Image (cartoon, rainbow, N blue to C red):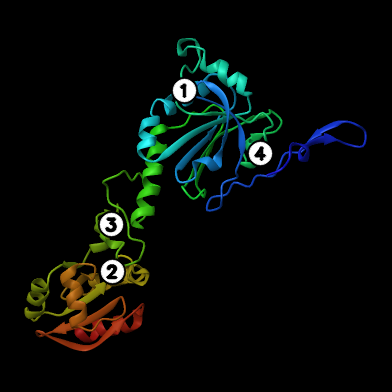
Amino acid sequence: DHDHDDYFGEDDEDDAFIQYPAPTARVQHKAPLFTAPAVHHEEITEISLDQYRGKYVVLFFYPKDFTYVCPTEIIAFNDRAGEFEELNTQLVAVSVDSAESHLAWTRLPRSRGGLGRMRIPLVSDLTKIISAKYGVLLEDAGIALRGLFIIDPEGVLQQVTVNNLPIGRSVDETLRLIQALQFHAEHGEVCPANWKPGEKTIQSNPKDSQKYFSTLKDEDEADSTEGLTVVKTKKDFQSLVASGKPVVADFMAPWCGKCAQILPFVQELAAKHPDVTFAKLDVTESEIDELKDDYKVDALPSFHFFKGGKEVGSPVAGYKKSLLKDAVQKLV
């Protein structure tokens, strides 16, 4: 923290100057601490960010008291403070107005543009130092942008959004973000777009993440199987091989980059050789994963060749178009 005189002084010509601190609020770093006057429980007091250690904090800045969008935001957050409390979260509002201005605003009825009785503290950043440290101060205008900062119980900044002056924020989205942060902190899994409590999350490793991604459908998913026979069980695969017809078994996975790269070439071969069955075997399917072990597949993609009810030739692993083409020619 700095003293007041660090930012306010006079130059050599006795002209007053103001030098605001550089922004220091960064995600994954400690949130800038402050102690400042505030209106809370209908009186002027002093609060410190550090007093909320052990809780999540939603610190949101707004431009000015007695304005238009600002009361709609503050009232919306305040009236749902109970939902935030259930999530062990403290709401704190900040503007560059004086504590006396805050108090007067809370005493004005909502029907006349006031706030009415408040459950959440309204911090006075009269020196504008807090707004500057959080990177939301418009120095020329002397007011703060609509910045919202979510701070975790250890005082680490986890999320930042900054809106321009005309645009209000969403209470629902703020609650969703806190729920997602808390879910990740407890379970370690990551939350996809638009996630809400009770919905599927993602385990952040290539294999286990497929439990989530396998539920998604691509717009071009039909193209990924065009000309190919999708096999999902051991029984279906064994029946295919037992038919005695030429079969190319393509062991692959949705997360495999080389599998995706060689797919168009495999489909070209399938179109050129209609008498050969090109079987697509996704190793993220449990029974196909067992087949992969049976055939000692240790790299993807891996192509195995069958004719007359048995495996013939040597497997081709990886992105090897020439070897694959030659193997298919021999199979015919």
Which of pointers 4 and 2 indicates the residue nearer the eye?
4
| Residue 236 coordinates in the image, percent (x, y) | 9, 71
Label 3 and label 1: CA atoms lie apart by 42 Å
Disc 4 target residue: 132
- Mark 4 surroundings: few (<14), some (14-19) or many (≥20) residues within 10 A: many
Q: Residue at x 7, y 75 (%)?
A: 239
Q: Secondary structure at mark 2?
A: loop
Under mark 2, the amino acid is: Ala
Q: Residue at x 28, y 62 (%)?
A: 210
Give the quarter of the figure containing the N terminus.
top right
Q: Is residue 326 above or below residue 92?
A: below
Circles 3 and 4 in contact, beta carbons < 8 Å: no
Disc marking residue 118: 1
Marked residue nearer the N-terminal end (3 or 2): 3
The answer to whether residue 70 shows anywhere in this view is yes
Which of pointers 3 and 2 indicates the residue nearer the eye?
3
